[in-house]
């Protein structure tokens, strides 16, 4: 499983690199703040929203601590997607939130 740290992700964002971030936390959790530009697709809905994703894109998956996003990465990889887990989740995120 490919992984990225919160610091690495923040550096990529500061360089204005185009990133597709999926936050797999529940809607109530995301209401407290998410990484700017992240799309919220709760883990339980990911399989139903898979048709919204592009297999040619690379996705960075985020949750609270890294566990649910790791599950999401495994699921997406099994479906032929390129996915990366942000280790430590939002607990490790020190950047801006929206």
Image: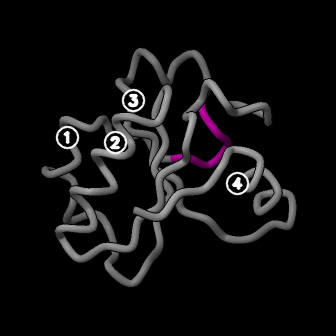
Label 3 and label 1: CA atoms lie apart by: 10 Å
Label placed on residue 41 = 2
**Residues at discs 2 and 3 in contact (Cβ within 8 Å):** no
**Residues at discs 2 and 4 in contact (Cβ within 8 Å):** no
List the residue tagged with mark 4. Answer: 9
Q: Quadrant of residue 91?
A: top right
Label 2 and label 3: CA atoms lie apart by: 7 Å
**Residues at discs 2 and 1 in contact (Cβ within 8 Å):** yes
Magenta-highlighted stretch: main secondary structure? loop
Q: What segment is highlighted magenta in the picture?
A: 34-38
List the residue tagged with mark 1. Answer: 45
Q: Seen from this angle, which residue lies furthest left?
A: 48
Query: Which mark sits nearer the N-terminus, 2 or 4?
Result: 4
Task: Give the class, few, some or many, for how many residues have Cα within 10 Å of label 4's Cα (few <14, many ≥20).
Answer: some
Image quadrant containing the C terminus: top right
List the residue tagged with mark 3. Answer: 25
């Amino acid at each position: 499983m490919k992984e990225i740290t919160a610091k690495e992700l923040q550096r990529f964002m500061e360089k204005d690199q185009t990133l597709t971030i999926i936050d797999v936390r529940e809607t109530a959790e995301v209401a407290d703040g998410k990484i700017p530009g992240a799309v919220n697709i709760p883990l339980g809905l990911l399989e139903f929203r898979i048709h919204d994703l592009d297999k040619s894109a690379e996705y960075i998956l985020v949750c609270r601590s890294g566990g649910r996003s790791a599950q999401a990465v495994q699921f997406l990889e099994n479906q032929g997607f390129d996915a990366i887990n942000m280790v430590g989740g939002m607990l490790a995120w020190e950047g801006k939130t929206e």
